[in-house]
Amino acid sequence: MPLYPQMAEWTKAVEQKVIAWRHDIHQHPELGNQEKRTAALVAAHLKSLGYEVREGVAVTGVVATLKGGKPGPVVALRADMDALPVKEQVDLPFASKARTTWDGKEVDVMHACGHNGHVAILMGVAEVLAGMKEQLPGTIKLMFQPAEEKLPSAEIGVARRMLAEGAFNSPKPDVVFGLHLVSFLNTGEIGYKPGPITASSDTFKVSVKGRQTHGSQPWLGVDPIVIGSQIVLGFQTIASRQVNVTKEPSVLSVGTFQAGTRYNIIPDNAEMSGTLRTYDDEMRKFYIKRMGETAEHIAQSGGGEAHVHFEADGYAPTINDAKLTAQMTPSLERVPGGKAMVIPKGTGGEDFSFFAQQAPGLFVMIGATPVGKDASKAEPNHSPRFFVDESSLLLGVRTLSQLSVDYMAMAQK
């Protein structure tokens, strides 16, 4: 508590800088593993504050460490830096007009998920905590992460690569905190919950092999479209009849189905793809096993073959450590200008999950829809019309600063 007045002074003093950083990054968005300008901005700021800075982690990531004036725990804070291949439709003076190459195609680029705000918030937190360095009873580790939105061709990168390249080494964090700006909450609201807060995110592909024939003589071939259709329905019986729906919910959706070139020709092959979302790792493994068996057996019954492939870049569910969440709930409740509330789990994916597997983690949602507007009707994250109320940025700075200082103080008792 003796640090609170100083923390309040520093957070308020940095607000306009945070807004300016967010404008700058928003106007110059960069896709995954291309965040060179953003990373350089971050690194220069952290070096000016006296942080020990390591650049080029997992291609463009930045890891920085600040040792406080007193001994204590190591607190890690994470922000993701990448934008999305989306054309902005928000009328802002700093709207993005950027274009780049992504997966071999020319695309528009926009910070449609709020990561520019995350970077600006953590840059602000870095300055707040640096200003209190001599009074801090512990060490701060900051992680500015590239490519949270995944990479083309299912390339494994992001949080897993940062960890593989030593982001949690020397020193190893005792806890890790993170946040996400969201439009489904209003400014001032801080959403949290113990246990799963975001789902796993897995991409799968299904290849069905049949035998081509004329559409008027299906008995002379093997129809992969019929087999594929039965596989889609078969997958839904896993969700509705084979997993324990009282334990955790799950979502299995087929999003693409491609086959054939002409109305009267049964093709050789059919291809499908989709997404699997779960909150329990054992359930996730069960789905993967049963989907492979279901597709294979249905195809065999129709005289064809089928194979299910899960991409290696899937995300685990983000699980807030129950003990840590209970411990830090009073801190969330005392964030100035904030209203902490328990929220339902979401079906979106987050690779903060991998950091939370290595140390007790707490991931919270920061409302970004202006007060007075119906957040349930706001444009969602990833929309070309996604809008962030800039008042939410100061709340983000206050939230991560409060969590960091309070955790260090509690560890001293």
Image: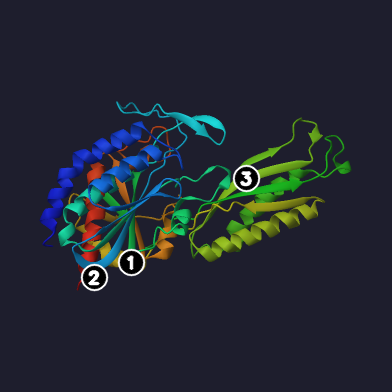
State the CA–CA distance, disc 1 to disc 3: 39 Å
State the CA–CA distance, disc 2 to disc 3: 47 Å
State the CA–CA distance, disc 1 to disc 2: 10 Å
Q: Is residue 318 visible?
A: no
User: Which callout, 2 or 3, points to the residue nearer the camera?
Assistant: 2
As displayed, is residue 351 above or below residue 25? below
Asked if disc 1 and disc 2 are in contact, CB closer than 8 Å, the reply is: yes
Residue kind at label 2, given as amino acid type: Ala
Count of numbered labels shown in the rendering: 3
Residue on which disc 2 sits: 411
Q: Residue 220's spot in the image, x, y percent?
A: 89, 42
Q: Is residue 152 visible?
A: yes
**Quarter of the view holding residue 159:** bottom left
Label located before the other in sequence (1 or 2): 1
| Residue at image location 87% in from the left, 43% down from the top | 219
As displayed, is residue 387 above or below residue 136? above
Look at the numbered disc 3 and give the secondary structure of its residue: strand
Please give left or right for residue 126 compared with residue 360 in the image: left
Residue on which disc 1 sits: 174
Asked if disc 1 and disc 3 are in contact, CB closer than 8 Å, the reply is: no
| Residue at image location 85% in from the left, 43% down from the top | 221
Residue kind at label 1, given as amino acid type: Asp
Quadrant in which the N terminus is drawn: bottom left
Please give left or right for residue 298 compared with residue 397 in the image: right
Label located before the other in sequence (1 or 3): 1
Of 391 and 132, which appears nearest the observer? 132
Q: Residue 27's spot in the image, x, y percent?
A: 34, 31
Label located before the other in sequence (2 or 3): 3
Q: How is the image coloured?
A: rainbow
Look at the numbered disc 2 and give the secondary structure of its residue: helix
